[in-house]
Amino acid sequence: MQQEHWDLSGRDVVPELRAAARPADVGAAALHAMLSSTGTQWAPPYEGVRRNLQIRSKQVAPELQDQADQRFRTYMTLFRGIGLLYEEKGILQSTALGESLLLLLNEQYQRIDDFGQQVYLAYRSQLAHMVAPALARYQLANPLTRDTYPPETDIRPLLAIWRIMRKLDNKLHWEELGRCVTTCLKESDIEPAIEKIAEARKRVDYNPNNPDVMENILGPRRPDKGSNQSDRLDTWFSRAAFKNLFLEYRDRPDGYRHLESEFIPLLDEIIDTSPPPNHFTDRGDYVRWLGEAPNRPSLIQTDSDDQLKNLIVAKCRRYGGRQIVALVGPAGTGKTRVAQNVAMTLADGDATRILTVQFHAAFTYEEFVGGLAPKNGGFEPSPGALVQINDAALASPDKTHVLIIDELSRADVANVLGELLTYIEYRNRPFLVPGLDKRVSIAPNLIIIATMNPTDRSVVNMDDALVRRLRQIEIPRSRDALDAILHEAGMANDLRRHVIQWFDSLPENAPFGHGLFVGMRDERDLHDLWHESLRYFLRRGGITTHPNPEEIENGYIWRHAKYDSVPTSQE
């Protein structure tokens, strides 16, 4: 019998690929479980300890059960003998030392888990670029399935889910999936399904969490596996999400699954460039085709860019509630671009929740926080950039808002920030903005990202109070980014390798980065770049501004006069 809908029999979901902490050996696991079980019955089968060991309840042979119980008693003898645990009136008890040890172990495991999460975030982009092409190629009708589909079936279900979500406000409900999408067996069925859901969502009575309403508006589930088949349909979401990579976790109260804004550009590229379906009869041929190694991602968005961005996102989420996250690096390292990309990820792609302000030497407290401003021949209270974005954050406490301060080090930071230095850290304490006659509390969901150049003179003059409230992250020069920039500009391979070799030899304190080389195609461009830009980072107004300019300029051969007459690639 031919299937008229997607297979819903499988319930396995994609496994979690993030590393997490665990006790080093069986004894450590037993100690942690027993310390976590104080106050429970200390008698076979030691249910409290087993629960904390996460041992599933199973019927086992009596001799194995006795052996396991004896093992717990043996551990009890050891841990009691070193002053950690004891039993009193049949109840497991912990000493003060045991309680302190449990706190230390929990903190250790949590720190390892936090670090594992940061590492995972740093590698998320590589993982996404690696698996997305294979997920997009997955075909409903393939040699691996036991189901028989009509000959014209050409749907690629995971790619279809991405396409549909992109057309439907980047979200899809499992009821919409089961009533409109699972019957799409051909690529040509996708657009009608999108239109049907889009029209249904316009209705005032539309409620995807009410099965009766959905039955009336979208029709029956195909197939009908009972009153609640969300676990079966979530299998398709899990595959399209690759656990939680391309889709958010299932924690939204509206029941929708949402695309991760971070990877929407990648999914758009995959949707546009994915090869057409293919026909296979051999299982091995199909799997090898499905798992082909992907092409290298776009050169301009390098893997190192994505890793750095994801690491900073993790830092912002961890420390942004009490510190300013400052991206530090010389000119041309892409600090502003990184800040904007991080902000878009934190704000779920919603640009209205991001505000950027650029500091300069004349920037004032009134412009940043707020104060009196001239208007109609007089003065009126005028909220500054901080108060504006802070008010928006307070009005939407469940959504992250981001304030980007570009070129933080160019202003008189202590005067511009004022008492904000204290209240960035202590957000539950309101402070008075005199010019506004208003008390302000910094919203806990407001993250402040700043960029600054370490060579600016004002950086040296920053006091300890400010430095303490900065979480400084270095944005380094990148040879990969330089290679991508020169390749994109069309520079010849031999010349590009020569430039990168010189770039690799630069000292760590070189005052410029890869971004200054955008658009450089040939030797004439490199000559002009030196004389019109790079040399001024080393000497300015007859004064040497870098401790060893010769170390940088000696290897830059394109600065010499003979390259002045070299024709450009456009001549």
Image: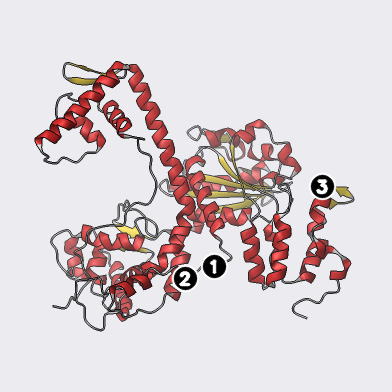
The C terminus lies in quadrant: bottom right
Q: Position of residue 60 (x, y in %)?
A: 12, 40
Q: Earlier in the sequence, mark 1 or mark 3?
A: 1
Which residue corresponds to mark 1?
298
Q: Say which residue label 2 marks.
A: 269
Image point 72% across, 71% down: which residue? Answer: 521
Q: Secondary structure at mark 3?
A: loop
Q: Are marks 1 and 3 in contact (CB under 8 Å)?
A: no
- Sequence-wise first label, 2 or 3: 2
Report the Cα–Cα distance between label 1 and label 3.
Answer: 36 Å
Picture mark count:
3
Furthest residue toward left: 62
- Answer yes or no: is residue 443 visible: no
Per the rendering, the mark at residue 548 is 3
Q: Tell me if residue 156 comes above or below residue 539 in the rendering.
A: below
- Nearer the observer, disc 2 or disc 3? 3
Quadrant in which the N terminus is drawn: bottom left
